[in-house]
Image (cartoon, helix red, strand yellow):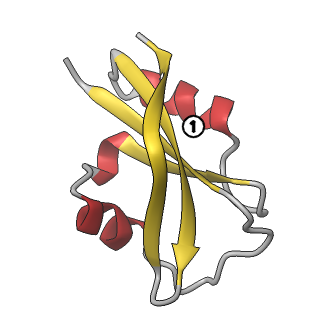
Amino acid sequence: MKQGLVVYLTGASEVDDSFDEEKAFAELGFDSRMTLLAASASNYYDVMDATKILLERGASRVEVAKAALEPGGKLKLFGEPMRLYG
């Protein structure tokens, strides 16, 4: 069973172009293929689009977690992930 995770970036109207999603996900121990970043900033998915993409990649369960972008390009998760599907 593959599990997908949508990381919703809170309070981010702009995200620096140098932000490396794969590195940030790896530091948290997440598989970058089954993890997507959603944000209100332009050029990012919204939560529903990210969920659909993860289901198309074969996820049988999708969760969402809130996070903030810290200096140095690290993600800080808030609370426990919430199940969206599966």
Q: Quadrant of residue 40?
A: bottom right
Asked if residue 64 lies left or right of residue 25, the reply is right
**Which residue does the image show at 73% across and 68% down from the upper left?**
12
**Rendered position, 5 above or below 48:** below
Asked if residue 21 lies left or right of residue 40, the reply is left
Q: Nearer the viewer, residue 68 or 32?
A: 68
Q: Quadrant of residue 63?
A: top left
**Which residue does the image show at 45% across and 89% down from the upper left?**
72
**Which residue does the image show at 36% across and 18% down from the upper left?**
61
Circle count: 1
**Rendered position, 48 above or below 65:** above
**Rendered position, 16 above or below 78:** below
Residue 86: x, y in percent? 40, 10
Circle 1: element type: helix
**Rendered position, 8 above or below 15:** above
Residue 54: x, y in percent? 44, 31
Q: Residue furthest front?
A: 79
**Which residue does the image show at 33% across and 15% down from the upper left?**
60
Residue at image mark 1: 50
Asked if residue 66 lies left or right of residue 59, the reply is right
Q: Amino acid at mark 1?
A: Ala
Residue 49: x, y in percent? 65, 33
Q: Nearer the viewer, residue 33 or 39?
A: 39
Q: Quadrant of the N terminus?
A: top left
